[in-house]
Structures are given as structure tokens and as C-alpha cells.
Image (spheres, rainbow, N blue to C red):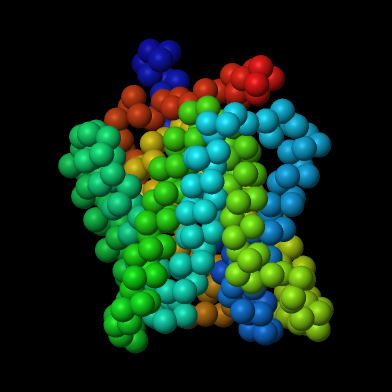
Amino acid sequence: MTTNTQTLVTSRTKGTALVLAASAFFATSGPLAKPAMTAGLSPQQVVSVRIGLAALILLAGVAVVRPSLLRIKRGDWRVLLGFGLFGVAGAQTLYFAAVSRLPVGIAMLLEFMSPVLVALWVRFVRGTVLPAKAWAGTALALVGLAMVAQVWDGLRLDVVGVLAGIGSAMCAACYFLLGEHGLTTRHPLTMATYGMLVGAVLLMAIAPPWRLPGEILVADTPFGPVWTLLVTVAVVSTVIAYAVGMSALRHLPSNVVSVLSLAEPVVATTLAWAFLAEQLDVIQIIGGLTLLAGAFLVQRASQPSAGGQLHPTTEDLAAVAQRD
């Protein structure tokens, strides 16, 4: 194996590990946020606090540790605004809107149709021919997701809910595509920080966190006071998850990352079973294995050249930031 091939394989392996890690961090949001909502907070309030706190943490942390990463060019604003509005605020808000009108399983399936949208964009807009195995793996992963979500349970049609779910899928696709595009010139922490700031402004207008009832914030849950859950969701499920997810897009193309990210509902379901005593049946277990098999097929089908270093290294980006 040549040095170049070894580098490509190592980068693809690292990217896969980062995607799976990001999916695990994202998946903790459900088990952590559910007790807060049970205590009396609305989904909109939870997501507003989640994104708002994450934006403050990222901004303060980057300003102290790597202030050069906060310097951006005028031409970067379009991508950053789009990433924040669609990839952060839009995906979160529309998903919760879908959940409020549809069974959770169907809302989840609609949102996680995003890999299909990403694949279609890559194929017909970018003109990149994807291997047949990539399409087969994507379809297999979606079948597994339907089994995990059990979409047939309480099936009912609500036009507004379906449209919200489709909208959340489109916004999730923007997360992968705009994130990948932005990383051609910006550091993952730059993308995550500004995306979170833009998303926070919009979400705070919808559900101002300063209007949260104090008695609910200090209410006890099986995992501690509500406010500690919100802080944990902001740090673990948002700051770390988005930073790691952006880093993965430096090693793998968006269509591969979007399919591998389907591991999130599998992890979320497992965590809910382990910590919230939610039922996990045989069909869901088989669905989880099917989903992971499909994701593995897509990862293996990705071209070796696509698994290489897609974007500049950290050192290259640091040098660019210092010159800006």
C-alpha cells in the first residue's frame, strides 16, 4: 500500500469515527431534553436555550483559545448565514413542529430523509456519479430507520406536519452541504460558532429564554435539576456534537457523512431504553442493525479519492486566519 493510499484510508477512517462520535453526542439530546419537557418546558423553549447557551459557550471559548478563528471575510457571510438559518435553526424548529403534529417515528423518518436529498444534489447539481452501492446502502439505511422509528405505529396524515418534516429534511441537507462548502476556507470551530450565533438569534425571537419560568428550571428530575440538563444538552449535545460533526466533513464527502449520521436515531433509541426505560423491541433491534449495515455499505462504496483530505488542514486554516 502506497503512502498516498494509506493517507486516504486513514483520513476516511478518521472521518467515519468522527461522524459516529458526533451522532452519539447528538443522540444524547433526546434523553436529556425529555425530562426537561416533562417538567413543563416546551420543545421550543428547550431548543432556544440549547442553541443560545451553545452559541455563548462557543463564542467565549474560541475567543479565549483561538481568537483568530473568529475573523472572517465578507464573502463568508452568505454561507455562515445559510448554515445558521437552515442547518441549525431551521432543522431544529421544523423537526419539533413536525413532532407536534405527527408521531415521533414519522417525523424522525422525514427528517432523516436528508441523505437522499444530499445524494440527489451531489448527483444532479454537482454532476458527481455515485456508485450503485451508495444508492443501495442509502435505501437499506432508510429501511432500517423506518424499523427503528416504527413508522406504522399510530400512523396518521397531517399535511402541515408532513410539510414541516420535509422542511426539516431539507434544512438537515443544508447542514451537510453548506457545512462541507464552508469548510473549504473556514475552520470547523468557525463554522460551528457563527452557525450557532445566527441560529440563536432566530430561535430567541421565537422562544426568548429569559422568559423561562424559574420554578421549572430548579425543578428536580431523575437526572438532577432542569437547569443542569439544559446546560448538559448545550455542551454535550450541541457544542461538542456540532464541532465534531463539522470536523468529520473535512475527511468525508457530505453524501457519506449524511448516511453515517443515521446512526443517531439508533443511539438515541438505545439511550432512551437504557436511561428512560423506554421499550426496545426485536424489530427495532433488527432495524438498527439494518441501518448500520446500510451506512457501512455507503462508507465502503465511497471513492478512495473522496475519502482523502477534502479541506485544508488545521495548520493551513490557522495560517489563513492570521493573514485575514
- Give x and y (percent) for residue 278: 52, 80
Q: Residue at x 66, y 17 (%)?
A: 323
Residue toward you, 11 or 321: 321
- Relative height, residue 309 to residue 199 (above, below): above
**Quadrant in the rendering for residue 227:** bottom right
| Residue sitting at the far left | 132
Residue 310 appears in the picture as rendered: yes
- Give x and y (percent) for residue 73: 59, 29
- Give x and y (percent) for residue 320: 61, 20
Whether residue 85 sits left or right of residue 203 in the image: it is: left
Q: Residue at x 72, y 58 (%)?
A: 53
Q: Residue at x 38, y 60 (%)?
A: 169
Quarter of the image containing the N terminus?
top left
Whether residue 187 sits left or right of residue 14 in the image: it is: right
Q: How many marks?
A: 0
Residue toward you, 284 or 63: 63
Quarter of the image containing the C terminus?
top right
- Relative height, residue 216 to residue 171 (above, below): below
- Relative height, residue 282 to residue 168 (above, below): below
| Residue sitting at the far top | 2
Residue 292 appears in the picture as rendered: no
Q: Residue at x 45, y 37 (%)?
A: 180
- Give x and y (percent) for residue 104: 43, 76
